[in-house]
Image (cartoon, rainbow, N blue to C red):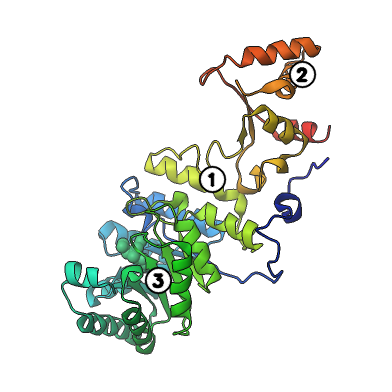
Amino acid sequence: MQNTEEFDDVDRIGHSIEFNGRPDTTPRPVKILDTTLREGEQSPNVSLTMRQRLQIAWMLDYFGVDAIEISPIISEDYRESCKKLLNAGLSARIVAHGRALKEDIDISMSCGADYVAMYHSVSDIHLKYKLKVNREEALRRATEAVQYAKSHGLYVRMTLEDACRADPEYMVQFAKEMEKAGADRLSIPDTVGIMRPIGMYRLVSLIRSNVKVPLDVHCHNDLGLALANALASYEAGADQIHATIGGVGERVGITDLAQLVISLLVLYKLKLNVRYDMLAELSGLLATYANYQTPSNSPLVGANAYKHKAGTHIAAILKSPNAYEIVPPSTVGNRRSLVFGELLGKNGSAFFLKLLGMKVDDTAIKSFSKGMKDLRRGDLFELELTKEMERAILSE
Ligand code: HCA
Ligand code: CU
C-alpha cells in the first residue's frame, strides 16, 4: 500500500497512449509570466487595492514565477503599485505593460521600469476598425516605439496584438522588423481566443523559424482552449507563457496558472522551480481579495477537485488514491474529501459505518447502502480527510 503521496509519474500516469512512443527526452525549460496584476485586473470580477497587489506579488514571487506584469499606465494608483513592486526586492522581473507609444514608455520609465512590454495590433481588423491606420503606418509606429525604448536602455518586449487573426505574411514581416528595431523578445497573443491547438502550434512555429528572439505566448480562453493553446505553443518553442491566478482576465480570461504549471509537470515532466503547494492558497487569496468564489469545479484548486463521491471511486481511493487522482492534493495545497451520498454503494457504506465506530454485518451494510440511495443533494455527508486519517487509511 502506498502511503507517501509524492507526485510520481509512473504510479500516477501509467502506460497510456498519451505517453507511449513519446521520446523520453529532458523537457525543455519554459518561463512563467504572471499577469494577474495586469490582464487579471481586466477581469470584470477583479479590482485590487495597492496593498492587495503587493501581497499578491510577494506571494507570486515566493511561489517562483519568473516575471510579474503590471500596467503603470492606467492611473496614479497603478503607477504607485508599479514603483513599489520595482523596489520590493523581488526575484521575479517586473514587466511594465503599455501601448507602443512614447507617452506610455515615458510613464513606465518614470516609475523606474527597466523592462517594458508594449503592444501594437497586427490584424487588419484591428488596424482598420480600432486604430484606423494602414499596415505601413502600424509598422512605422511600432518600430519607432521599440527604437525609442531601446535608446533609453530598456529591455523591450513587443506584443503583436491580435496576431492570430492577422495575415501571416504581414505578421512575420512585422515580427522581423521588430527584431531588427531591437526588440529583445516578442509576445504572440491569441487576443480573442480563436485558435485551436494545432493552429497555435503552426503560428508559433512560423514565427519561431523567422526570428531569433525569445517568444512569449498569451492565450485567451474564449473557447475554453487557453491551456491547450499554451501547451501547443510550448511544444512549438515558446520561451515564456503568460498565466493568471484563477485564469482571470479580460472577458473570460487567459491560461490558468495552476493548470499550466501542473500540466507541464504531468504531461511534459517539466519540474519548474516553483512551490506547487501554494497553488490552492494563491487561488483562494485572489478570490478573497476580489470577492468572488473559486468555482468548485476548478481543476486542481477547486473545492471539488479532490472530492470523491461514487462508491466505487471511494472504495478505490481508500485502497490507492492514484486510482482516480493524477496529482495528489497535497502537491497543489488542496485537500481530499469523501462524499457520502446516494452513490455510496456497499464498500463505501461499510467504510462509513466503520468510521462511526459501528460493528455491522453484511445485511446491515446492504440496508444502509439502500437507505443512502434516497439521499439527494443537501443530505450529503462530506468528510474531509485529515493527514492522520489519510495515513491511517492508506496504511491499513
Ligand atoms: C489586450 C492586450 C493583450 C496583450 C498581451 C501581451 C492581448 O488585448 O488587452 O502583451 O502579451 O491579449 O493581446 O492582453
Ligand atoms: Cu490579453
Q: Upstream in the sequence, badge 1 or badge 2? A: 1
Q: Residues within 10 Å of mark 1 (few under 14, many from 20)?
A: some
Q: Amino acid at mark 2?
A: Lys
Q: Pinpoint residue 141: horizontal percent, then vertical percent.
A: 23, 81
Inspect this view and state whether residue 392 appears.
yes
Q: Residue at x 81, y 42 (%)?
A: 2
Residue most extreme to the left: 132
Residue 224: assigned label: none
Q: Which residue is mark 1?
A: 299
**Rendered view: 339 above or below 88:** above
Q: Pinpoint residue 382: horizontal percent, then vertical percent.
A: 60, 25
Q: Residue at x 81, y 12 (%)?
A: 361
Mark 3 sits near ligand 1, with its Cβ under 8 Å away: yes
Q: Residues within 10 Å of mark 3 (few under 14, many from 20)?
A: many
**Rendered view: 208 above or below 42:** below
Residue 354: assigned label: 2
Q: Which residue is mark 3?
A: 188
